[in-house]
Image (tube, rainbow, N blue to C red):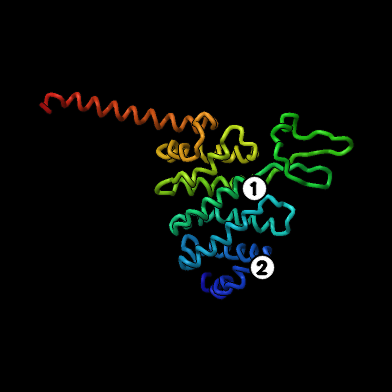
Amino acid sequence: MQTAVCPAMKALVVKELLNHLDVDVRVVVASCISEITRITAPDAPYDDDQMKEIFELIVATFENLSDTSSRSYPKRVSILETVAKVRSCVVMLDLECDSLIIKMFKHFLGTIRWELNYGARMFTCPFIYYYYSFGSFFMCGRKEISWETHSDDVYSSMETIMTLVLEESEEVSPELLAPLLDSLRVGNQDVLLIARKLGKKVIQNCALKLRPYMMQAVEFMGFPLDNYYEIVASICQETSDAIKHNDANVSNECVGLGPLLW
């Protein structure tokens, strides 16, 4: 199979395609390459330098996932789902694409959303969570306003990718946690409810992994702990309790060794 796709593999990574001026062309190229990564998985189809360029291209396709009316939207979703299924995001860690991973997290939390469909026109409503309590739809004059979301597959793929990255990281930097913490900061009006839900779910998935890093990340953000939702505080509290427990055990051991130390 890999021999059969070899000509296509070589043709897709020429500079003229990777840097094409037409964004839809770049999305098509990224879609084709993501299919190649699926075929060659778990092995990467290109060398490290080429894979870094490819990941740049792939992450760029996530930036406009909110534009569901775009003709390239189905391909963007397909790329997202493939990255989640073949775990190619883990290769990004191996290649130390730290800044690119952070950018990807920001794209996910910035593009996942509920959308407001007003008649034939669709637009994003930043304050959708204020209206949602009135039900799944309501009437405005003679026109119906209904709620629509990205598909469950989009949400699930984003959750899977972010969870994989955090769980597979040797260490979790404050910069990597910053987009997630930003989505869980109380009173942050720039964050949609669905993005907050996504951020909370990812942190819940990785709570044990994040325990040693969460307090440092909160301090890095520069906001008090009580400015965040309960999930953040609970992880920090568990860290504090674990440290106190360890200190108590060490003290007890020292007390027990007292006669031997004199």
Q: Tell me what residue is drawn at x 67 percent, y 46 percent.
A: 151
Element type where label 1 sits in the image: helix
Residue behind mark 2 = 21
Determine the residue located farthest toward the right in the rendered image.
142
Q: Residues within 10 Å of mark 2 (few under 14, many from 20)?
A: few
Q: Of the residues shown, which amino acid type is indicated by label 1?
A: Thr
Q: Which mark is residue 208?
A: none
Determine the residue located farthest toward the left in the rendered image.
262
Q: Nearer the viewer, residue 59 or 227?
A: 227
Q: Tell me what residue is drawn at x 51 percent, y 34 percent.
A: 223
Element type where label 2 sits in the image: loop
Relative to 78, say whether 198 is above or below: above
Q: Tell me what residue is drawn at x 62 percent, y 46 percent.
A: 110
Q: Tell me what residue is drawn at x 56 percent, y 40 percent.
A: 182
* Labels 2 and 1: the sequence-earlier one: 2
Q: Of the residues shown, which amino acid type is indicated by label 2?
A: Leu
Task: Please give left or right for residue 145 compared with residue 235 in the image.
Answer: right
Between the residue at mark 2 and the residue at mark 1, the CA separation in whole angstroms equals 23 Å
Q: Do the CB atoms of the residues marked 2 and 1 lie less than 8 Å apart?
A: no
Relative to 258, say whether 148 is above or below: below
Q: Which mark is residue 111?
A: 1
Residue 53 image position (x, y, % from top left) = 53, 64
Residue 155 image position (x, y, % from top left) = 61, 45
Residue 257 image position (x, y, % from top left) = 16, 27
